[in-house]
Image (spheres, helix red, strand yellow):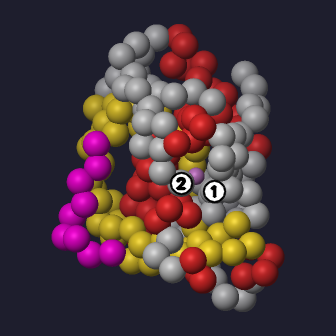
Amino acid sequence: MAIRRVLKMGEPLLREVAAPVTDFGAPLAALVADMDDTMRDLHGAGLAAPQIGVGLRVVIFELRDNPRYPQLAPIPYTVLVNPLLTALGGEQDEGWEGCLSVPGMRGLVPRFRRLRYRGLDADGAPIDRTVEGFHARVVQHEVDHLDGILFPQRVRDLRDFGFEDALVGQMTPMPD
Ligand code: NI
């Protein structure tokens, strides 16, 4: 498979609403393989298909032995297709996020603390999980990509948005 170029904020596809997947055959498997290679090459915690130029509702995420986030509980490798999110309880936490499509930048973003997510895996089998904390944050960040939303649009106060190297010591790093 292949490491693909990651689109950057400003490229039109990142602002579009992605289309549902209807075919779970070989092209989807090839897309997911390229997403895996690209996410791991860049040490990301997640990636959405539009970030490599494909306007389909597919996200992947994983947190395991990631040198960027050594203090966080692992998240199992997951391929989530056609996701449906339901916030549980309405409580939100603020956390610092980054994004492979917004390189070098970080921002403080509110996300629902507890989340139920449903969807399908790469073989079309159902996924239904209830999660919280960083896991919930990663899923909300990735699924935003499928609706054309990047994390800077979620930052409440632009004073809490800036360059990673300038923010060292002011933040706890969050998903990429
Ligand atoms: Ni992102």
The single residue placed furthest to the left in the displayed view is 89
Position of 2 with respect to 176 (left or right) is right
Residue 150's disc number = 2
Residue 52 image offset from top left, x and y in percent: 65, 33
Residue corresponding to mark 1: 99
Relative to residue 148, is residue 70 depicted above or below?
below
Q: Is mark 2 in CB contact (under 8 Å) with mark 1?
A: yes
Q: Earlier in the sequence, mark 2 or mark 1?
A: 1
The answer to whether the residue bearing label 2 lies less than 8 angstroms from the nearest atom of ligand 1 is yes
Magenta segment: 84-92
Quarter of the N terminus within the rendering: top right
Relative to residue 169, is residue 69 depicted above or below?
above
The answer to whether the residue bearing label 1 lies less than 8 angstroms from the nearest atom of ligand 1 is yes
Residue 94 in sight from this viewpoint: yes
- Residue at image coords 66%, 47%: 10
Q: Quadrant of residue 6?
A: top right
Indicate whether residue 128 is drawn in magenta: no
Residue situated in front as seen by the camera: 60 or 15: 15
The single residue placed furthest to the right in the displayed view is 165
Sort mark 1 into few (<14), some (14-19) or many (20+) by Cα contacts within 10 Å: many
What kind of residue is marked 1?
A: Cys
Secondary element at tag 2: loop
Position of 86 with respect to 152 (left or right) is left
Position of 81 with respect to 31 (left or right) is left
What kind of residue is marked 2?
A: Leu
Secondary element at tag 1: loop
